[in-house]
Amino acid sequence: MTLLDVRGLRVAFGGRDVVRGIDFTIARGEKLALVGESGSGKTVTALSLLRLAQNAHCSGSALFTPAQGAPVDLLSIPERAIQALRGQDIAMIFQEPMTALNPLFTIGEQIAEVLQLKQGLDRARSAAAAFELLESTGIPEPRRRAAAFPHQLSGGQRQRAMIAMALACRPALLLADEPTTALDVTVRGQILDLLSELQRAHGMAVLMITHDLNLVRRFADRVAVMEAGDIVEQGPVAEVFAHPRHAYTRRLIDSRPARQVQEVDAAQGQPAAGLLQARGVQVRYPTRLPGVQGWFRKGSFVAVKDASFVLPAGQTLGVIGESGSGKSTLALAALGLQPCSGELRVDGQSWGQGVVADRALRRTMQVVFQDPFSSLSPRMTIEEIVGEGLRVHAPALGPAERQQQVLAALGEVGLTEGQFPNLLSRYPHEFSGGQRQRLAIARALIVQPRLLVLDEPTSALDVTIQKQVLDLLQRLQRDRALSYLLITHDVDVIRAMAHHVLVLKDGDIVEDGPLSQVLDAPRHPYTRTLVQASR
C-alpha cells in the first residue's frame, strides 16, 4: 500500500523554484533514497513535507495515509494537524545532531519530552521509555548516556540519540537527512545496520536523503536521482545502478575517485631519508586529574604514541583512521603547530630553530584544510587571500608581479578571469564548495612548496566535485613532484591517492606499508574493519 504519494511538488523561495514539480511515492515499509549533489533540492523536499522549510512557497500535493484515518495532504492541512503528525506519524533525523539537539538538556530529557508531548506519558514512564529507546539503538552504557548532555557524546552516539528520539512514537515514515555524513566509515556502517534493523522491526518506511552512492547500494530498495530541483531518474536500486538512463545519473555513478598517480616500486620499501621524517613522535595533552590530586599536578593524555614514518619527495603518505585516532594531531605536529617529543624533520630541519628558520620551513610545507569556507577569510578578496603568502615569503615583489603570480596560481587550479569576471576582487562566498577548495589549494601552491598537508581535503564536497579536486591534486603532484601528507577516513580517497599508508587507532600506528599491502591484504583486524566498511 502507498504510504506517501507526492505529485507536482514545487518549492520556491522569493519566486525562484528550487524544486520543480517532482513526483514520487513511498510504500509502507519501503526504503527510498533521494540522491543528488548539494543544491539539488533534496533537503528542501524533505523539509517541505513537514512544512519546516521557512519562507518557502509550496504547491502540488503530498498525500499521506496514516495507520488510522483517511489520507491527508501534508501541504494543505491546517498547522495544528501537521503539528500532530510531526514526531508521531512522520519523524525526521537531521544531518547534524549537534545543532539539532538542545545543548541545555540531557539526552534522556529530550527523548522523554517527545513521549510526554506525543504519547501523554508522565515523567517517570517517559524517562524509563527513553532509557529503553537508547538501549535499543545499541548505544554503550545507555543509562549513563541518558544523563549526558549532547557535547559529552561522540558523533556516532549523538546520531544514535537522534534516532532514538525519532523512533520514540514508532512513526510510519522516517525522513533521514544525510544521517551518516559526519561519521567515520565504521560508525557509518553501524548506523546503517541499526536503521535497517529498526526499520524491519517497526515496519516503517524511510526516505533517505544522501549523496553517498555506497550508502544507497547498501540500504535502499529504490532510488530517485535529483538534479537542479528535478527528479531525472528513479527505479529499483539494482536496475538504476546497473543501467542508468540519464547522463547525470551516469556521472554520479562514475564519480568514484580514480587513481592517476605516478607509481613507485613497492619492492624497494621506504627510503631511509625523505622530505618528511618522524621517529618516535609523541604528542601529549595535559588533563586535569580528579579529586585532591588535581590540585597539585596534572595528568596527560597521549594523542599520538611513538609514530615513525618517512615521506619521500613526490609521493603521498596516507594516514587513515576514525575520529579521535590522532590523525589531525599528527598533522599539526608535522606542521610545527603542536609541540611533540621525538624527532620530526622537514627537509632535514627541525621545527623550533628560530623565527627565520621556521619561516623557511613554512614555505616548504603548506596545508589545505578540511572546510574551505571556514579556512578562507570572508573579509579578504581572492587576490588578498591567494597572495598573502607572497607578502610573507617574497616581500620584495611589487604589486604587479604579485598579481601576475596570483593569476598564474589560480589558473593552475582551473580558475580564470574568463570563467569569473573580476575574479581577483571577488570574495569566498561567491564560489561553490569545490571552487573554494581550489582557492585554498592555489593559496598553498603560490609559495612553491614541496610538501602539502591535506587534512580531509574532500570530505565536505559532493562526489563529483570530490573527484575533480582529487584529479587536480594528482595532476599537480605529477607536474610539480609534490609530496602529500594525506589525512582522511575515506578508504576510496586513500586508494586513489596514496603510495604508502599508516593506519592509526587510538594514537597507535597499528599497520603501515605500501598501499596494495595494507588495503588488499590487511594484517590488523582494525584495518580489515575499515576496508570492509568502505565497500
Image (cartoon, rainbow, N blue to C red):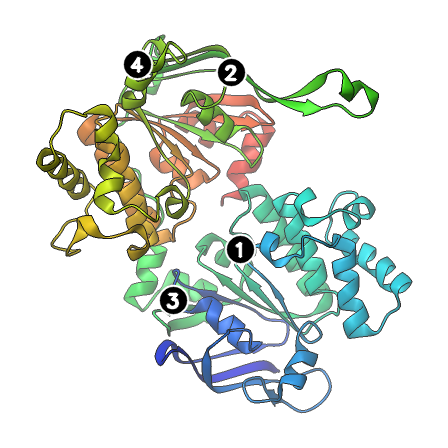
Secondary structure type for disc 4: helix
Tell me residue 476's x, y (percent): 22, 34
- Residue at (53% x, 40% y) in the render: 532
- Residue at (45% x, 29% y) in the render: 319
Secondary structure type for disc 1: helix
Q: How many marks?
A: 4
- Residue at (51% x, 37% y) in the render: 531
* Pointer 1 or 3: first along the chain: 3
Query: In terms of image quadrants, where is residue 262?
Result: top left
Q: Nearer the viewer, mark 2 or mark 3?
A: 2
Q: Is residue 281 left or right of residue 292?
A: left
* Pointer 1 or 2: first along the chain: 1
Q: CA distance from mark 4 to mark 3?
A: 49 Å
Tell me residue 124's x, y (percent): 90, 61
Q: Residues within 10 Å of mark 3 (few under 14, many from 20)?
A: some
Q: Residues within 10 Å of mark 4 (few under 14, many from 20)?
A: few
Q: Nearer the viewer, mark 1 or mark 3?
A: 3
Q: Residues within 10 Å of mark 1 (few under 14, many from 20)?
A: some
Hey, what amino acid is under mark 1? Arg
Q: Which residue is mark 1?
A: 218
* Pointer 2 or 4: first along the chain: 2
Q: Which residue is mark 4?
A: 356
Q: Which residue is mark 2?
A: 340
Hey, what amino acid is under mark 3? Ser
Tell me residue 277's x, y (percent): 39, 13
- Image mark for residue 40: 3
Considering only vertical position in the picture, is 80 above or below 230? below
Q: Nearer the viewer, mark 2 or mark 4?
A: 4
Q: CA distance from mark 2 to mark 4?
A: 20 Å
Q: CA distance from mark 1 to mark 4?
A: 53 Å
